[in-house]
Image: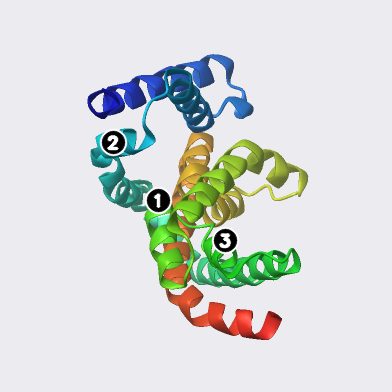
Amino acid sequence: MILYLAIPLTLVTYVLAQWVYKKTALAILNPILLCIGALISIMLAFGLDLNEYEQGTTILTRLLEPAVIALAFPLYQQFVHVKEKIIPVLIACSAGVIVGLVVTTFVAISFSASPEIIASLAPKAVTTPIAMAISHTIGGIPAISAILVIMVGIFGNVCGPFLLKHSRIRTPEAQGLAMGAGSHVIGTSKAMELSCIHGAFSTTALLISAVLTSIITPVLYPFLITWMV
């Protein structure tokens, strides 16, 4: 039964979660977090089959890629501002990708994580489809990478503005870059709520970081593993 109800159930749950978030305006009540929690609770309560639910939401899953591409629209709207600062943006995104990969690998190895888990952690800061593809390429588990991507994104969405404010990072360009580079699409959705400039720079960081991560990670990751282990 869940095979045919999966899409309506998901959409209704998300709309209700959005309504709760807008009514309360509490960051902790992030609509994605609420939706995930509600769907898990419903499936456990009624004993619904996860595989059937996954099959039923195949259409929504396939819409992830065009949804990411659609984020380029605010970038187009603010392209003049972004173009003026493209060199610093490229440098910042490159540094973020490399530092994030090195630190993540080092911490995972320090906690004696298995090679598969380490590889799954490596692409955590890019959007789900790209993270899963990179994870598969370097020997990780795509499903775990997807879960980590969602967790990182929700954390950035909920805590990002607070952390940036108290870190004295106040310019909308820098805040947008940080949220896009660190929290991908979910962080970018929060940046778009703040302002058009936040959204444009967050989208820029999201797209550039995704491209750089897909290029750098398969090349740098094997060297990091060899050097750190």
In the rendered image, the vertical position of residue 1 relative to residue 175, given as above or below: above
**What kind of residue is marked 3?**
Leu
User: In the drawing, does residue 111 fall left or right of residue 41?
Assistant: right
In the rendered image, the vertical position of residue 78 relative to residue 227, given as above or below: above
User: Is the Cβ of the residue at disc 3 closer than 8 Å to that at disc 2?
Assistant: no
Residue drawn 69% across the image and 46% down it:
164
Q: Secondary structure at mark 2?
A: loop
Residue 150 vs residue 164, the one in the foreground: 150
Report which quarter residue 208 is drawn in.
bottom left
Q: Which residue is mark 1?
A: 78
User: In the drawing, does residue 127 fall left or right of residue 56?
Assistant: right
Residue drawn 44% across the image and 50% down it:
200
Report which quarter residue 82 is drawn in.
bottom left
Is any atom of residue 104 visible in this view? Answer: yes
The span from disc 3 to disc 1 (Cα, nearest Å) is 32 Å
Q: x%, y% of residue 220? A: 54, 80
User: Is the Cβ of the residue at disc 3 closer than 8 Å to that at disc 1?
Assistant: no
Q: Secondary structure at mark 1?
A: loop
Q: Residue furthest top?
A: 23
The span from disc 3 to disc 2 (Cα, nearest Å) is 25 Å
The label nearer to you, 3 versus 1, is 3
Q: Which residue is mark 2?
A: 57
Q: x%, y% of residue 22? A: 50, 19
Say whether disc 3 or disc 2 marks the residue closer to the N-terminus. 2
Say whether disc 3 or disc 1 marks the residue closer to the N-terminus. 1
The span from disc 2 to disc 1 (Cα, nearest Å) is 34 Å
Q: Residues within 10 Å of mark 2 (few under 14, many from 20)?
A: some
Q: Which residue is mark 3?
A: 121
**What kind of residue is marked 2?**
Thr
Say whether disc 2 or disc 1 marks the residue closer to the N-terminus. 2
